Image (spheres, grey):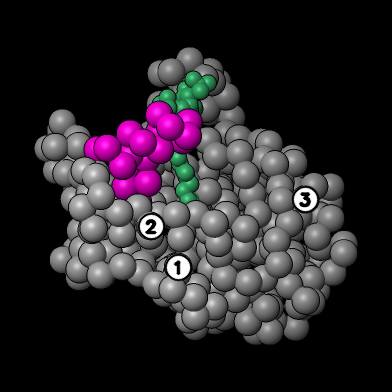
Amino acid sequence: MAIRKVGVVGCGLMGGGIAQTCAAAGLETVVREVSEEFLRKGMKRIDAFLQGGVDKGKLTAARKAETLGRLKGTTQAGDLADCDLVIEAVIENIAEKCKLFAELDAICKPSTILASNTSSLSIIEMAAATKRPGLVCGLHFFNPVPLMRLVEVVRTISTSEATLAEAHAFAKAIGKTAITAKDTPGFVVNLLLVPYLLDAIRALESGLATREDIDAGMTLGCGHPMGPLALLDFVGLDTTYYIANIMFDEFKEAKYAPPPLLKRMVLAGHYGKKSGKGFYDYAAKATKA
Ligand code: CAA
């Protein structure tokens, strides 16, 4: 694998998780945020996750220190210039992402692979903002990044064979299993996951069963680690609403149409875990009120 140094743009939940995973796998990693405040917050989250691993006996304090030692935080885009791979995990807004890709294209060395962690936006649109479309691909990670084993490698109609091979080698090097998907909204996982999550909301909305019984049905009946309503809270209702709308716009199929209850909850600010309330209540220490 030619990738020795990785850059990550955005140190939120996804970007921070990606940066942590790369550093833990032994790669020199630099993560960029727009402000010192966001960077501090992101680094704190990474530190807490690694400490959680130490507390659980999953890694030693020395491994934690080594990982943090390989991870550099910055607010300077120029620090990404000599990275072999840069993965962006900024806000899901196509205009912002295209602007960032054009900026990275101007800053990074000619051989740098540019990747997006988007879950639903068009990678080719981002590639078109650069002069290196053959070196652009999607690398879609799953939350929580350090624990979820999958990466979707997204290939556009312009992605080169060499870039695809490097992306797969990178995923393997950081301990993930990669699958390849075409550049269409939702790729493989969200194409199947989103209609399932929306159906769970429809089931609740129609009074089929309680939230607890819907979730117990899928955890105990199908062996899923979380029921669909708990997973919606975990992923974020706003995020799911956003992805569903993009998929509905593209495919015009009713199964991707966000149900009214989802829209109402998003309008009310009930985004799930991150806002303290979704299908369950997270405000109190005792969750799932
Ligand atoms: N460091 C290292 N290991 C840790 C850790 C840490 N800080 N925290 C937890 N772990 C380990 C645990 O030790 C445990 O390991 P073992 O299985 O070897 O015992 C494992 O991780 C699971 O942790 P927990 O037992 O503490 O937690 P859990 O069993 O409740 O699992 C979960 C938590 C992994 C989130 C699980 O509930 C799960 O897989 N949920 C589904 C998540 C999911 O579907 N994510 C994808 C969402 S969709 C998406 O992200 C894409 C998109 O575009 C929207």
Amino acid at circle 3: His
For badge 2, the amino acid type reads Asp
Mark 1 vs mark 3: in front? 1
- Give SS at disc 3: helix
List x then y, in percent, for residue 226: 39, 37
Which residue corresponds to the image point at 15% horizontal and 33% vertical from the top-left? 285
- Asked whether the viewer can see residue 80, the reply is no
Furthest residue toward top: 57
Q: Is residue 50 left or right of residue 27?
A: left
Disc assigned to residue 199: 2
The secondary structure type at the circle numbered 1 is helix
Amino acid under label 1?
A: Lys
Label of residue 117 in the image? none
Q: Which residue is mark 3?
A: 168
- The answer to whether the residue bearing label 3 lies less than 8 angstroms from the nearest atom of ligand 1 is no
Q: Is residue 172 left or right of residue 286?
A: right
Instruction: Determine which of the numbered discs, if any, sits on residue 255 in the image.
Output: 1
Magenta segment: 212-232
Direction from residue 81 to residue 231 in the image, left or right:
left
Q: Earlier in the sequence, mark 1 or mark 2?
A: 2
Spatial distance from mark 2 to mark 3, Cα to Cα? Answer: 33 Å
Residue 289 appears at what percent x and percent y?
Answer: 14, 37
Q: Is residue 229 above or below residue 66?
A: below
Q: Determine contact: label 1, label 3, CB under 8 Å.
A: no
